[in-house]
Amino acid sequence: MEAVTFTTEDGVRIEGELRMPDVDAKGMAVLCHAHPRHGGSKDHPVLWAIRNDLAAARGLAVLGFNFRGTMGSAGTYGGGRDEIRDVHAAIGHVRGRLHDDLRTVVVGWSFGASVAIREALDDRRVAAVALVSLPLRPSDLVLPPLPDPADLRTFTRPALLVAGEHDEYCPSEDLRGYAAALPNGRVEIIGGTDHFFWRREREAAAVIGAFAEAVVSSA
């Protein structure tokens, strides 16, 4: 694991960790963490499991990072709007380290999924997205609106939407309804778990890993 830093277009220094596979990288992935004001960071077990699967089992180079104002990243919390710049810069950093012809998959969990889909809509460098526990019912969290169905219909790249069977912030039926607007979207529900995938992290990671591997191998 290599500690890295990079700078956003508005001059914020972001910290991250780049994990390279043991073989030549088949593709790249950027991981976006949960809400910074509710304990979210790049070091959560869910993201560790995803990172391990993508790098060790799928041969991807994986960049995990902390959003602005989180742990060692500079700046202040941006309400879910400024964080789009963080993802944009993270994609640029990992692509700058590898070959631009390798496909890039963006994976977001919870708050990070909300940021990921809003970045991916306008960023053609993103080959696919995996949205994990997308906060469709964010409770007391104040977040920018998610893209509406009209916007989602323009996103023709592969999209995987994953949630736990008992996720109160991302109910299965709500997720299926939201995903229906995505031309190339697919929903996977992990049974017997909730928003945090306790003790089911590896199962969720394997689903995401298989999706990402298929995306980067289809280039």
Image (tube, rainbow, N blue to C red):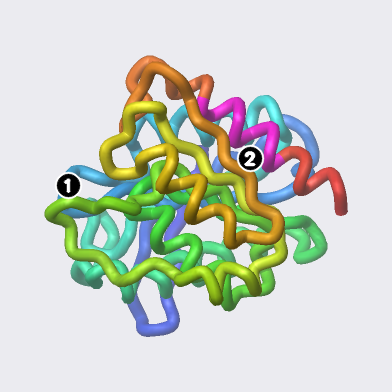
Q: Is residue 111 above or below residue 12?
A: above
Prevailing secondary structure class for the magenta stretch in the rendered image: helix
Circle number at residue 20: 2
- Place of residue 89 in the rendered image (x, y in percent of width and height, measured from the top left): 49, 70
The stretch of residues the image draws in magenta is 204-212
Amino acid type, callout 2:
Met
Circle number at residue 38: 1
Residue lying at 19% horizontally and 69% vertically, measured from the top left:
76
Q: Is residue 39 above or below residue 191?
A: below
- Place of residue 55 in the rendered image (x, y in percent of width and height, measured from the top left): 63, 34
- Place of residue 179 in the rendered image (x, y in percent of width and height, measured from the top left): 55, 53
Specify few, some or many for label 2: CA neighbours under 10 Å numbering under 14, 14-19, or 20 or more: many
- Place of residue 168 in the rendered image (x, y in percent of width and height, measured from the top left): 27, 37
Question: Residue 210 lies in magenta, yes or no?
Answer: yes
Q: Is residue 181 above or below residue 78?
A: above
> Closer to the N terminus: mark 2 or mark 1?
2
Question: Residue 49 lies in magenta, yes or no?
Answer: no
Do the numbered discs 2 and 1 sit on residues whose CB atoms are within 8 Å? Answer: no
Residue lying at 76% horizontally and 47% vertically, measured from the top left:
215
Specify few, some or many for label 1: CA neighbours under 10 Å numbering under 14, 14-19, or 20 or more: few
Residue lying at 67% horizontally and 69% vertically, measured from the top left:
125
Total number of numbered labels? Answer: 2
Quarter of the figure with residue 113: bottom left
Amino acid type, callout 1:
His
